Amino acid sequence: MVDKHLSTQFDAELSGISTRVLEMGGIVEAQVAHSVEALTTYSNELADAVLKQEERVNQMEVEIDRDLSTIIARRQPTARDLRLLIAVSKTIANLERVGDEAARIARTVQRLVNSGISSRLRLPMSDLSYEAELAIAQLRKALDAFARLDVERALEVLKQDDQIDKEFEGLMRKLITYMMEDPRTISSSIDLVFVAKAIERVGDHAKNLAEVIIYVVKGTDVRHNTPDAVENMVR
C-alpha cells in the first residue's frame, strides 16, 4: 500500500512537471509568433511584449530544473522514468533557447524601427512570415508529441525539418539579390539574415525535442541520423 501511494505521488509529480513544460512551450511559441508579427508590422509594442516574457521563461527553466533534481534525489526513478526526467531537462533547455531566438528577433525589430526603416523598401517580409509559420508549426507538433509521448508525431517533425532549411536558403538568395539591386536595403537585409537564421534555429530546437521524445519512448538515441534512418531504428 505504501509503495502504491509513493507511486501515485510520483506520477502526480511527473504530471505536474509535464504540464509546466507545456505551459512554457506555449509561452515561447507565442513569443516567436509575436516577434515575427512585430517585424512585419514594425511594432515596437509587440517587440517589448516579447522581451518582457523572456524573464518568465528563464525563471520557469530554473524552477523546473530544480524540481527535477529534487525528484531524482528523492524518488530514485526506474530507467524509463529517469529517461523521462532527463528528457524534460533537455526539453526545457531547448524551449528556453527558442525564447532566446524570439527575443533576438524582437531586439532586431526595435533596432529596425528606431533606425527609421521604411515599409516601402522592397524586403521579403512575407517569406520570413512563411518560414516562421513552418517553424511554429514544427514546434507545436513537437510539443503535441511531448504531451502524448507520440513517436509517430515526433517522426513527422524530423521528416519535415528540411522544409525550413530550404525556405531559409531561398530567403538568403532573395536577400542577396535585394542588396545587389538596391543598396538602401543592405543594412536592413543584414538584420533580416539574422532574423531568418533565428527562425531556422527554432525549427532546429523543435527537431531536438522530437529526438528527445523518441529517446524517452524507445530508449534509443537517434541524434545525428537521417529521418529515414531514425524511422528504421524505431520500427
Image: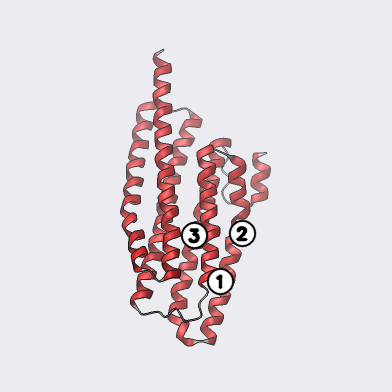
Residue visible at 40% across and 37% down? 17
Q: Position of residue 168 (x, y in %)?
A: 56, 67
**Lower position in the chain sequence, tag 3 or tag 2:** 2
Q: How is the image coloured?
A: secondary structure
How many neighbours does mark 2 have within 10 angstroms: few (below 14), some (14-19), or many (20 or more)? few
Mark 3, secondary structure of its residue: helix
Other residues around mark 3 within 10 Å, as few (<14) / some (14–19) / many (≥20):
some
Q: Which residue bears the numbered disc 3?
A: 201
| Badge 1 amino acid | Leu
Residue lying at the far top of the rendered structure: 1
89 displayed left or right of 123: left
Mark sitting earlier along the chain (1/3): 1
Which mark is drawn over residue 162? 2
Q: Counting residues from the N terminus, which is met first, the one under dot 2 or under dot 1?
A: 2
Would you identify the image quadrant in which residue 188 lies? bottom left
Distance Cα–Cα, label 2 vs label 1: 14 Å
Asked whether disc 1 touches disc 3, contact meaning CB atoms under 8 Å apart, the reply is no
Which residue appears at 53% of the width and 43% of the height?
144
Instruction: Locate residue 143, reporting x and y percent.
Output: 50, 45
Q: Is residue 66 above or below residue 27?
A: above
CA neighbours of label 1 inside 10 A, class few (<14), some (14 to 19), many (20+): many
Which residue lies under the disc numbered 1?
Answer: 171
Displayed quadrant of residue 89: top left
Q: Position of residue 233 (x, y in %)?
A: 65, 42
Q: Residue at (54%, 51%) from the top-left corner?
A: 207
Please give the name of the residue rendered at 53% of the width and 59% of the height, measured from the top-left corner: 133
Q: Position of residue 228 (x, y in %)?
A: 68, 49
The span from disc 1 to disc 3 (Cα, nearest Å) is 14 Å
Identity, as a three-letter code, of the amino acid under mark 2: Asp
